[in-house]
Image: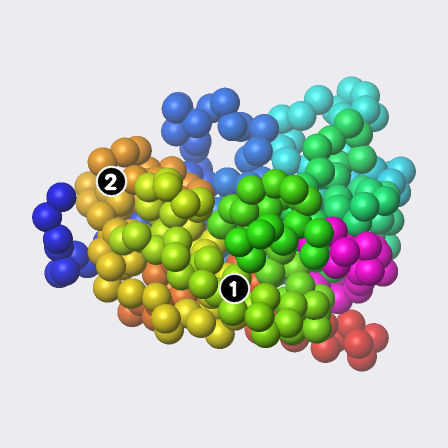
Amino acid sequence: MARNLTAQLEKKKHAQYLKRILQIMPSQMAQYDSNRMMFAFFSVSGLDMLDSLNLINETEKLSAIEWIYKLQVTDPGVRSGFQASTMLPNDTAHYQCGYLPMTYTALATLLALGDDLKRVNKKSILEGMRACQNNDGCFMAMITESESDMRFLYCACCVSAILNDWSGINKTTAIDYIVKSISYDGAMGQGPGLESHGGSTFCAVASLYLMNELHNVLNKDQIDKLRRWCLMRQTSGFQGRPGKPSDTCYSFWVGATLHMLDSGHLIDPVENREFILSTQDDSIGGFAKFYDTRADPLHTYLGLCGLSLMGEPGLLSMNAALNVSNRVYNHLKEIHKKWEND
């Protein structure tokens, strides 16, 4: 593919694409309807990153906020949190259970929509989250028959940071799990003994960052080794593992990790930008995983985030660890101040 150094971000088309996702799911994504909260996060946060939340009017914002609160489960406490969709069966308590990724994305989306989190049952969520932590320090996604890995530990840290309350996490065992997940190459896998991966490395580093423990846990040699692994992931864009092709989403996962390591300036921004923009749909908007493949909400949002980390004009700056815009993060800090004064 020929180099295109003059490609422009199709901001309006991406905004319209994300607005459509909020209104109706594409037919090819119907199988993911049970993860609707996640798609709401990608869409709302993507519009926020584009500084285009004005495309959602106040009535639509209030309606979206009410829909999210309908997903909140508060009784019994150990099953608390936010569900993924209102399409889940509601005729039996077995299905009423919080899911850590959806709890994180629900809270982040509420913040992006300007909500004050007053209706969030903090005590109940923390109780449910606490019940999801395993003896090894990692977290299950939910209390009922669930997998556990670094992704859910990260979600627990995000929820704790948003709620400004770390009582739902045993930090000592969580940190121990992260340390044991450091591979021979300096990066992190989903768990101890597993292959290093761009996504799990981000989750591990961001978790330590949110706990304010990054430089207490990792020494200079470990950080240097980790930084080198991340920088070696750039081909044109970024790959998630050695030997894999560049993928739009890793411009965020790996780029954000380097950002938290104060090393974002060491990447090649021209090559990375060129790759990301090569995956955008110039006709209807959205970003894809690779060039000449179908756009989807996840890669659209994370592609925008990757560009934001490099200071792309027209995009909001972002808080890499929480994966939200700095506008949202500043709104959260104002909420924390109010809680402290109450």
Residue indicated by mark 2 = 291
Describe residue 317's horizontal placement relative to residue 16 as left or right: right
How many numbered discs? Answer: 2
Q: Is most of the magenta stretch helix, strand or loop?
A: helix
Residue 338 seen by the camera? yes
Amino acid at circle 2 = Tyr
Judge by depth and name the residue closer to the eye, 318 or 57: 318
Q: Residue 171's x, y, as percent?
A: 80, 60
Residue 75 vs 112, above or below: the answer is: above
Work out whether mark 2 precedes mark 1 in sequence or the reverse, and give the earlier one. Answer: 1
In this view, the mark in front (2 or 1): 1
Residue drawn at x 72%, y 77% is 337
Residue 286 seen by the camera? no
Q: Which mark is residue 110?
A: none
Judge by depth and name the residue closer to the eye, 48 or 170: 170
Q: Residue 236's x, y, as percent?
A: 27, 53
Residue 259 vs 60, above or below: the answer is: below
Residue range (magenta)? 161-178
Judge by depth and name the residue closer to the eye, 82 or 323: 323
Residue drawn at x 53%, y 28% is 33
Answer whether labels 2 and 1 touch (C-beta < 8 Å).
no
Residue drawn at x 59%, y 66% is 222
Amino acid at circle 1 = Lys
What secondary structure is found at the residue carrying circle 2?
loop
Marks 2/1: CA–CA distance:
31 Å
What secondary structure is found at the residue carrying circle 1?
helix
Residue indicated by mark 1 = 225
Q: Residue 28's x, y, as percent?
A: 39, 24
